[in-house]
Amino acid sequence: MNVPEDLRYTPDHEWVRADGEEGVVGITAYAADQLGDVVFVELPATGTRLSAGASFGAIESVKTASDLFAPLAGEVLAVNDALSTQPELVNSDPYGDGWMLRVRIDDPGSIDRLEDAAAYRTRIEAA
Amino acid sequence: MSYGPHTADDRDRMLAALGIGSVEALFEDIPAPMRSAGLELPPPMAELDLARRMSELAGRNRVDLASFLGAGVYRHYIPAAVDEILSRGEFYTAYTPYQPEISQGTLQTIYEYQSLIAELTRLGVVSASHYDGATATAEAALMAIRATGRDRILASRAIHRHYLDATRTYLDRGSLHLEELPTTVDGTTDLDALERALGDRQHPVAGVLLGQPNLFGLLEPMGAAAELAHAAGALFVAVVEPVSLAVLAAPGEYGADIAAGEGQPLGIAPQYGGPYLGLLASTEALMRQVPGRLVGETRDLDGRRAFVMTLRAREQDIRREKAASNICTNQALCALAATVYLATIGPHGLRDVAAMGAARARELEGALAAAGAARVHGAAYLNEFAIRVPDAERVHARLLEQDVLAGLPLGRWYPDDDTLRDALLVCATEVTTSEEIARFAAALREVLR
Amino acid sequence: MSHGPGGVSLVEASLAGAATAVEEARPGPAGRAAVGATLQPTLAELSRPGRGGGKVPHPPKDALDGIPADARRVSPLALPELNEPEVVRHLVNLSHLNYSVDTGFYPLGSCTMKYNPKVNEWAARLAGFAGLHPLAPDALAQGTLELMHELQGALAEIGGMHAVTLQPAAGAQGELTGILMIRAYHRARGDTERSQVIVPDSSHGTNPATASMAGYETLTVRSASDGGVDLEALRSALGPRTAAVMLTNPSTLGLFERRIEALLEVVHDAGALAYMDGANMNAVLGRFRPGDAGFDVMHFNLHKTFSTPHGGGGPGAGPVACVERLAPYLPGPLVIRDPDGRYRLERSDERPTAIGRVRAYQGNVGVLVRAYAYIRAHGGTGLREVSADAVLAANYLRERVGTAYELPYGGPCKHEFVASARNLRAASGVRTLDVAKRLIDHGFHPPTIYFPLIVEEGLLIEPTETETLETLDAFAEAMLAIAREAHDDPQRVLAAPTTAPVRRLDEASAARRPELRWRPMVGRETPCPT
């Protein structure tokens, strides 16, 4: 299962690609695989405040639905509008075209509290 | 009488396979103190005796009166094909179509139902049905609350009382508010009051609900109400009667975001209250807020067109506490009745049903006015209206003695309203005859004398 | 009995004997199909302008003169135009695409797909019942009121409860009614801090959804390894904020809650009330009465336990029964028998503590008529026998299916049991979904799958009491044959079904880009292809 080294991860299977004060958020290939065919992604409006660990949206597959949890506190700068017509991008390219949010991170240091690739890989291998 | 097939030998074979001597061994997991020894119910009956008992009970009801009672449930002619199709075991003994490969009959008929109701309402998304008009109305209010993120509903007091009661029950969770809008002397919803209520910026409104026709049978200014609602950022919900949509403006035409209503007039017998058909339709923008089942078109692996329950992730069995509603079933068989009804009666037939009801109602209005009972309200009506009589309950009871069911005494539902305390709500449909109207008028003249 | 071209119904096949039936069930030119084979066009595609009509007389030309112009419909009424023979043929052909109790065995766990007696259908259609207006004065409704009064009493007896409302339209609405009654009870005592409802992780999805609808927060407690509710987990979840605990007994795993006494004791010790989901009452009629055990309120599913037909997904009915302390809160109107022997609906001022109505009128009375007929046909002794036979059949089937599938929980089961295809998946990649689809090729409706959620690769199998031993054996043989196929020829199972009118569907595309009605239609001049 693809777990890119340059990302940080949550136990709820979101990833963050941080670049200074900004970050991009999505869900991992493992999560997309567990969900199966993604059919709908509900994302917040631009400008929404995120608090770490709180639900920011939901993702639905044919037979299940899950909440999406914010990895970090911050503000939504942009959402991936392509997902509204092509939710399958989450399955086909979870770390690329299947991204969900671009956020301004309140505390760039908080990224270090998330799991690195090795820790996340260990987690999903144990599941 | 039992429907079980097992012979003593069958039971012995099953017990032997399980290595037990008696079926009682299978109930030993019930703690002894709470094991029940049996039920105090009447003894079993043979089918003949049961049929007799059921006939006797049905015979104790009286359904042979000249009836002018509507108030949300209407007598209509039901083409014979409707019950013929409903009686097919392949439809009525099937379960929810969770296995689409062997449920295309139910799935396609629901899809056809959704399409037919979409055309009637001119709204693009139609739920596979709710329990009845009351719960569909309540669910429409909850949809408006979810879609707007607001917590306040304004509903005309001239919506069916049971619908308002059920909506109040569904909204009674502490944080949600339902306010009733008053009516004017002409019997329609007071738009000035609506505008004032919408103007409270401290407490923005999620949805505005009006009936069309309203409970008094009157035609509401739906377009104007919808504009007011939208100007305040609220959704507009039309509570409609489906047959009337053949001739009255469709909710989608006057900008309603949601239509709710009772589908009983579409080929379903009154049955003392149900099962009926909760109509719920919305614009496509609200598709993911629609509670309950939806059926959609898709393809199978070989590319054949097929139908399947879709957007399932909103539903309780997947979403559990986060579901849009706890609704699990729909009223599939009643939706099938509506489908067969609309398919057999056709667009011209449905217009004829609606227009004939209007014609009979005007005939009724004239006859009752001549007998001394004038209309209560001034607004236009379709096929139901209120008349004023002194001491409506007494008049109603006296007419009943003469086998005339003179509608509904409105004082029962509006005890505090002076104009309605002495009002009878009466209706006519295409099955009402001139003879029945004459009988009603003659008896009324006698009673009022 | 009816079936599609070349099809042989399961009942006929099962009469031919189990071993033969399974041989015949193998797909191929000689195989039997679960349902008919011919897909149908839509009504819109069949429509031709000018067809149909003649059902009702034409109104006078001036009929609508009283309707103001701005209230009239402007857009065309683009409904399909068809003549009656076409409509009937269309729908009969569609019916052939359905699997149903009348055409075959329907072992859906938690759904109780028993036979739907025909005399009940006949009775519900009697003009005296069907034609009665819901607002008819009591004097005109004495027959139906008597029936409802008797049914209230019978359900109270079966539940060991004090009083019953027949109003809820379905089990889920019964749940909502019960939870709202519990809230009214707490409120009336000034006990307003209770904001949580506890459900086990094996519960029906309607339980937590109901709690949310009533404005409660849901707490989920885990099941113990034996499938029952974990007493310690429940104890630690309970507290001064707990309003109610919703339990299903027998549980959704088909097991009687052996710790039920202790569970109910800790619930009540916390000041909470106990709701029982009565979905599984078919296992315990006349053998376990929830009220005797200490449950406070419950619902019945008349469409499960009392044989009213499922109708392709409804209507059902979900009457609610409760103990005396909750009776003040039942939604009105109840049916009352006056001292003079006449029946009437309760007036709204007689019991002002009632919660508001949950729907219009008196309930799904047409369904109540059928359930009443079923209860009268069986009597108390017959209902007890229903449960004995349902439980015996389930245990017998469990024994047979268990030779090839895992049984995650010990027996005896009640009216249904859980099996798992985990072993098949590990050995061959064949999953429960594939087993289910392959059963279609063997002529059977699949069991409930992937429920309860806590069972990996779960199959919930409920035979009911109305299936012959031959049918049970034929189903067991099909399950065993599929297990063998999974081992010998997994591709065959993975490709199933191949004998149904359609193969597996693209559900993802259906949900991503929903097509929920004929297109183009709304907004177009005419719906019909020319």
Image (cartoon, coloured by chain):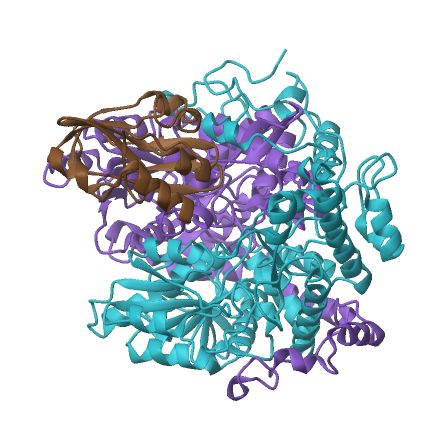
Considering only vertical position in the picture, is B171 above or below B354? below
Rendering quarter of residue B261 = top left
Judged from this view, the residue extending furthest toward the top is C530
Quadrant (top left/top right/bottom left/bottom right) for the C terminus of chain C: top right
Chain assigned purple: B
The picture places residue A67, in percent across and down from the top left corner, at 33, 42
What color was chain A assigned in the picture?
A: brown
Considering only vertical position in the picture, is C83 above or below C150? above
Between B15 and C170, the one nearer to me in the picture: B15
Between B253 and A120, the one nearer to me in the picture: A120
Q: Total number of numbered labels? A: 0
The picture places residue C528, in percent across and down from the top left corner, at 60, 17
Picture residue at 59% right of the left edge, 74% below the top: C284
The picture places residue A38, in percent across and down from the top left corner, at 44, 32
What color was chain C assigned in the picture?
A: cyan
Considering only vertical position in the picture, is B430 above or below C388? above
Residue B149 in sight from this viewpoint: yes
Rendering quarter of residue C324 = bottom left
Residue C167 placement, left or right of C38: left
Picture residue at 50% right of the left edge, 74% below the top: C257
Considering only vertical position in the picture, is B48 above or below B177? below
